[in-house]
Image (tube, rainbow, N blue to C red):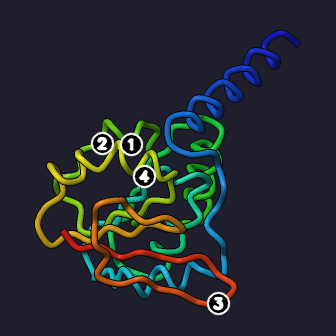
Amino acid sequence: MWILTLILFIFLLSLAYASASGAPWVPTWKKDLERILKLVNVKDGETFVELGCGNGRVCRYVAAHSKAQVSGVELSLLQFCIAWLQAKASGLKNIQIKFGNAFHQDLKNIDTLYMFLMPETYEKIRPKLESELKRGSRVVTYVWPIAGWEPVKIDEVEGSQKIYLYQR
């Protein structure tokens, strides 16, 4: 019994740490997945990375509807396990889910980066994005803009969240 309690404690501690580090887990709405894919316009062979992928919903959708190499990074152990298991169960070969911190990921070879984090997290990670993302890479944020950046497009649909597209 104490082992189950310890495992539960570790999952909850990890979830709390991830929430405090970037954002609490709130999934991207399913009805917005097609809009996101259309906006990012990911091409065959490109790389698509989601920082803070939660249960991997966006990653699985992009992997299923493109030939991009898709990676999700998640800091919450519970969400990582769910995302990893669902990615494996999907049978998709072009998806990889990693356990890790968004602030420690190498962003140098990414074509498209997707994030649904808190505005204050965008402020903290912005210098990393500016120093590591290659010229021409696309950055997409869900709900909140990145302060100090000018989006090339804002996708707005009544009754849905805003989606911001940036180009480095």
* Left or right position of 35 against 47: right
- Please report the residue visible at 53 percent of the width from the left and 74 percent of the height from the top: 61
Front: mark 4 or 3: 3
The amino acid on which the numbered mark 2 sits, given as a three-letter code, is Gln
Kind of element beneath mark 2: loop
Which element is circle 4 on? Answer: strand
Residue at the disc numbered 3: 158
Q: Are marks 1 and 2 in contact (CB under 8 Å)?
A: yes
158 left or right, relative to 9 = left
Q: Which residue is mark 2?
A: 105
How many numbered marks, from 0 up? 4
Q: Quadrant of residue 165?
A: bottom left
Is 40 on the left-hand or right-hand side of 32?
left
Q: Which mark is drawn over residue 51?
A: 4
Badge 3 or badge 2: first in the primary sequence:
2
Q: Earlier in the sequence, mark 1 or mark 3?
A: 1
What is the distance, in whole Å, between disc 4 and disc 2 at their CAs?
9 Å
Label 1 near label 4: C-beta < 8 Å? yes
Q: Name the spot of residue 151 as percent of width and height, x first.
A: 31, 76
Picture disc at residue 102: 1
Residue 45: image location, x then y, percent: 25, 75
Q: Are marks 4 and 2 in contact (CB under 8 Å)?
A: yes
